[in-house]
Amino acid sequence: MATPTDSPNPPFIIPERSLDRDCTTLSRHVLQQLQSFSPDAQDLSALMGRIALAGKLIARRLSCAGIVDGVLGFAGSENVQGEAVKKMDVYANEVFISVFKQSGLVCRLASEEMDEPYYIPENCPIGRYTLVYDPIDGSGNIDANLNVGSIFAIRQQEGEDTTGEAKDLLQNGHKQIAAGYILYGASTILVYTIGQGVHAFTLDPSLGEFILWQENLQIPKHGSVYSVNEGNFWQWDDAMRDYIRYVHRHEGYTGRYSGALVSDFHRILLQGGVFLYPGTTKQPEGKLRLLYESAPLAFLVEQAGGHASTGTQAVNDVVPNKLHQRTPLIIGSVEDVALVESFIHDRQQRDPSDPS
Ligand code: P6P
């Protein structure tokens, strides 16, 4: 009988990788970035390790969609956003809470899925960090087996939150000390920054570890992709319509829109281009939430040499007035974001009363 080596196409063999690369886990990478083993560095490294665990638990569950209960379909409730909650939204939200219990790291968690911040009392005297997160971004994609993601940011708690309203979270995005996302796709990718570049890890299921894939990602200055839900055209202001008409009439643009912000953003981070979720007549402030969707991605894209704008100001300069505040989002390559902003500026010049 022919042995595999005799066949014209020997079986695919995973190329040998260096032991050192297999050992460059997320937790180790954080310490390398900080070049420190101080208690704060160890805390941040441990924090990212817990987020990686959350990603592994969510990825495992998603991979069983259809053969395990609790993955597909709706939970039968609505969240604070007024959106129908998917079963995976509930599960993923609980996962992030569970991985931080007994960690001594995070005192509060603020999530798209919870009206108010969640406190972990046993951590609060010690843990001075707050996790803000969207546990499953794009959950409408789950039942169609399309990409979804988790988005997170870590902030330092300031002062004593005696009222439980977490008012210290109502500060601009420059207060984020770490941010990133986990993309659950053909592979599970974790991308993060602690303010020293953007770095990407791939989950190696055989190790159960996120292993370093790429360091210091830089977004191209321009890309051909524009990512927007054109079904909202009828609800946009004139500036957005002017931009869309421009890309429809000029060579070199291609539309890509998955329905999951993380998925569309990841493509743009790697290939260049721009993602837009402008304000609409129904939601003038936009759909995406500032604290746990737009601001974390804005931190990432600025670290990668890109830009994130509301159309009139940098996303990371926006000071929220409430936990679940929404903002319009234009994010991606500097040249492509600037092109969109130029149409807004032109309209304002022509009609200063135009709020766009
Ligand atoms: P629409 C998913 O619900 C989400 O928050 C983002 O992940 C995504 O980019 C956007 O909303 C999709 O919204 O209105 O185009 O379906």
Image (tube, rainbow, N blue to C red):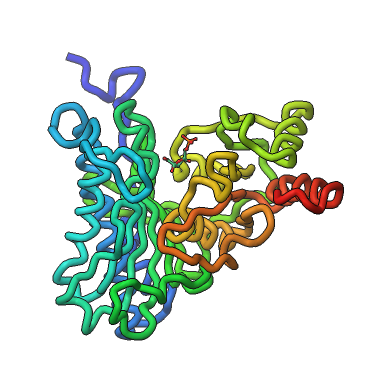
Query: In this rendering, is residue 146 above or below 219?
Result: above
Query: In this rendering, is residue 114 above or below 70?
Result: below
**Is the N terminus in the top left, top right, bottom left or bottom right quadrant?**
top left
Give the image location of residue 206, x and y in percent.
22, 45
- Is residue 113 left or right of 349 when viewed as pictured? left
Q: Quadrant of residue 21?
A: bottom left
- Is residue 126 left or right of 331 when viewed as pictured? left
Query: In this rendering, is residue 276 above or below 153?
Result: above
Q: What residue appears at the point 52 percent right and 70 percent down from the top-left corner?
A: 172
Q: What residue appears at the point 29 percent right and 60 percent down from the top-left corner?
A: 51
Give the image location of residue 166, x and y in percent.
35, 73
Q: Closer to the camera, 178 or 248?
A: 248
Whether residue 83 is visible, yes or no, is yes
Q: What residue appears at the point 28 percent right and 20 percent down from the top-left corner?
A: 6
Q: What residue appears at the point 41 percent right and 71 percent down from the top-left corner?
A: 169
Give the image location of residue 158, x and y in percent.
39, 82
Whether residue 17 is visible, yes or no, is no
* Tally of numbered discs: 0
**Residue most extreme to the top:** 1
Q: Quadrant of residue 121?
A: bottom left
